[in-house]
Image (spheres, rainbow, N blue to C red):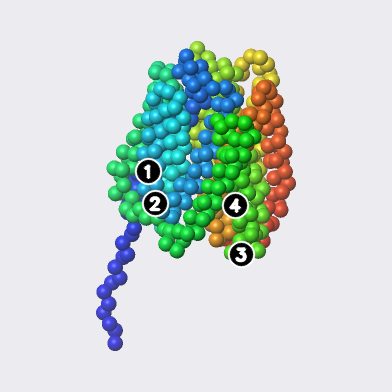
């Protein structure tokens, strides 16, 4: 006997799957505009931070030494990435991505407001608040983008492409607008522009939260009461380690000050990835095949660390070279030195589609390790090129096109390494640690910028030619070494792959 059954009712989705934003969910518009303006505030502030720290007090700066200023900006970048690990954990286990983003945005806005107020105390408080807020917000906006799509939704990749375009638009416009504001009203006017940008980001996020549905609303893996005692013990151990490192740095430096904080954060940035790898290798949850993949990931991680060490000097040594060693008069126009920091996002916007087309069209695209090696080699060549330009300029200044070429070469390297970096991390990390893959990837730029903080201090007084040339030579040797290791890396990836399809994605 046939029974008449009611047609199955569709299960309501947790998030709206509309197509109102260029064929994508309207929630993408919320996150696109939020990230655009947040990146505007971040890169706007970063574009002038070194100049503000090192400029004379009579010019509105803080008047600290050039070397200390370079180290402070580098270690600020380190702290942002270290805190992003904490921010991702808080979102996963306690707050959820949505509240983490909101709270982080409020802290960032408060930090920019502090920077807009004259006074060294307000400035250092502002830098700390921006770092804390960015660490809370940075990893969680992109995680909500992923929640807007089902895993099999073919729009996912293009949705992330649109989202990342917002990042580049914000970072492209920021140095231009903030540079104009600084020229017209001084450093604090520039920081005020960054504060306005973050305020706009918050308005878009709060006003558009309904378009997100349930995305990011709850912590995906909330803490249970049974886990709290172990968490407290772990937290106390971490705090104890931080205090011990801080006290050791204080003893070595002889006084508690900026140098102590730089050394403390540097040690933590170096120790964190080492601890991560040791824990993963020793974990009983990690299989022998997973250890093979993990072994293959180590040279990729080191290469990424060296790449970001060079790339993130856009706000430090390259900003200093642009201001002090570059001819800023172009066709009769005087160019603000921070304007050069817009070259990278502009090149990304122009060249990303070309690279996406290139990887598809190539019959045999480079292996993952080869892409990393190409990226690191290009970063090395950018510094070697700048070292040569510095030598040719002698005691004079390099033409403006030199800085443009440096940034474009680095952008080419970024397009080779960065897009595959997180994919490689998530696929090569052991299954038990796959949820923490984003944290592991963030530790590469954290450690890279910590290296810069130590390098600028150790090489104080050396010429630009020696500094950029030395780093370029070491990075080039590392890139060539990775080319040689590429077959070994690929063999370990294939040996540890769980499926043929997985081996094809990262090879």
Q: CA gap, disc 3 to disc 2?
A: 30 Å
Side (left or right) of 79 relative to 309: left
Estimate how packed mark 3 is, as few (under 14), some (14 to 19) or many (20 or more) residues with alpha carbons within 10 Å.
Answer: few
Rendered location of residue 324, percent (x, y): 58, 18
Q: Are marks 3 and 2 in contact (CB under 8 Å)?
A: no
Side (left or right) of 426 relative to 137: right
Q: Depth check: give the residue in front, 11 or 356.
A: 11
Q: CA gap, disc 1 to disc 3?
A: 37 Å
Side (left or right) of 43 relative to 359: left
Query: Which secondary structure lies at badge 3?
Result: loop
Q: CA gap, disc 1 to disc 2?
A: 10 Å
Looking at marks 1 and 3 on the same chain, the residue that comes earlier in the sequence is marked by 1
- Image: 213 above or below 496: above
Question: Residue under circle 2?
Answer: 95
Looking at marks 1 and 2 on the same chain, the residue that comes earlier in the sequence is marked by 2
Q: Is residue 107 visible?
A: yes
Looking at marks 3 and 4 on the same chain, the residue that comes earlier in the sequence is marked by 4
Looking at marks 4 and 1 on the same chain, the residue that comes earlier in the sequence is marked by 1
Which numbered dot is residue 284?
Answer: 3
Estimate how packed mark 1 is, as few (under 14), some (14 to 19) or many (20 or more) residues with alpha carbons within 10 Å.
Answer: some
Name the image quarter holding residue 121. top left
Rendered location of residue 274, percent (x, y): 63, 49
Estimate how packed mark 4 is, as few (under 14), some (14 to 19) or many (20 or more) residues with alpha carbons within 10 Å.
Answer: some
The quadrant of the rendering that contains the N terminus is bottom left
Question: Residue under circle 4?
Answer: 276
Q: Are marks 4 and 1 in contact (CB under 8 Å)?
A: no
Q: Residue at x 32, y 53 (%)?
A: 213
- Image: 249 above or below 149: above
């Amino acid at each position: 006997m046939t029974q008449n059954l009611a047609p199955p009712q569709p299960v309501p989705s947790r998030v709206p799957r509309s197509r109102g934003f260029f064929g994508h969910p309207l929630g993408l518009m919320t996150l696109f505009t939020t990230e655009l303006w947040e990146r505007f505030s971040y890169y706007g502030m970063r574009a002038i931070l070194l100049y503000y720290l090192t400029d004379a007090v009579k010019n509105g700066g803080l008047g600290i030494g050039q070397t200390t200023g370079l180290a402070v900006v580098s270690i600020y970048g380190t702290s942002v990435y270290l805190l992003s690990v904490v921010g991702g954990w808080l979102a996963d286990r306690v707050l959820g991505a949505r509240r983490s983003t909101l709270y982080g945005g409020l802290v960032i806005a408060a930090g920019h407001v502090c920077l807009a107020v004259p006074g060294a105390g307000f400035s250092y408080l502002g830098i700390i608040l921006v770092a804390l807020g960015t660490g809370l917000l940075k990893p969680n906006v992109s995680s909500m983008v992923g929640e807007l799509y089902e895993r099999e939704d073919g729009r996912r990749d293009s949705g992330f492409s649109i989202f990342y375009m917002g990042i580049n638009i914000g970072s492209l416009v920021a140095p231009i607008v903030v540079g104009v504001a600084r020229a017209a009203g001084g450093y604090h006017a520039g920081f005020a522009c960054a504060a306005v940008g973050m305020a706009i980001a918050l308005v878009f996020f709060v006003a558009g939260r309904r378009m997100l549905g349930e995305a990011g609303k709850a912590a995906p893996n909330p803490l249970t009461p049974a886990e709290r005692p172990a968490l407290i013990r772990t937290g106390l151990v971490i705090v104890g380690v931080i205090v011990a490192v801080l006290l050791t740095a204080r003893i070595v430096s002889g006084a508690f000050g900026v140098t102590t904080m730089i050394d403390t954060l540097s040690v933590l940035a170096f120790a964190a990835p080492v601890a991560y790898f040791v824990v993963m290798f020793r974990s009983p949850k990690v299989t022998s095949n997973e250890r093979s993949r993990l072994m293959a990931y180590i040279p990729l991680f080191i290469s990424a660390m060296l790449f970001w060490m060079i790339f993130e000097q856009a706000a430090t040594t390259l900003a200093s070279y642009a201001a002090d060693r570059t001819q800023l008069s172009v066709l009769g126009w005087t160019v603000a030195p921070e304007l050069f920091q817009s070259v990278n996002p502009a090149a990304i916007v122009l060249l990303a589609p070309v690279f996406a087309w290139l990887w598809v069209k190539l019959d045999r695209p480079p292996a993952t390790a080869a892409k990393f090696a190409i990226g690191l080699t290009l970063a090395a060549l950018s510094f070697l090129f700048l070292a040569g330009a510095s030598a040719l300029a002698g005691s004079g200044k390099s033409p403006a096109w030199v800085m443009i070429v440096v940034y474009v070469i680095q952008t080419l390297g970024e397009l080779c390494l960065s897009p595959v970096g997180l994919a490689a991390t998530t696929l090569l990390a052991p299954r038990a640690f796959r949820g923490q893959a984003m944290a592991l990837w963030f530790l590469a730029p954290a450690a890279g910028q910590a290296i810069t903080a130590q390098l600028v201090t150790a090489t104080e007084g050396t010429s630009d030619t020696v500094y950029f040339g030395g780093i370029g030579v070491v990075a080039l040797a590392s890139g060539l070494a990775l080319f040689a290791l590429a077959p070994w890396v690929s063999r370990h990836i294939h040996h540890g792959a769980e499926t043929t399809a997985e081996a094809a994605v990262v090879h």
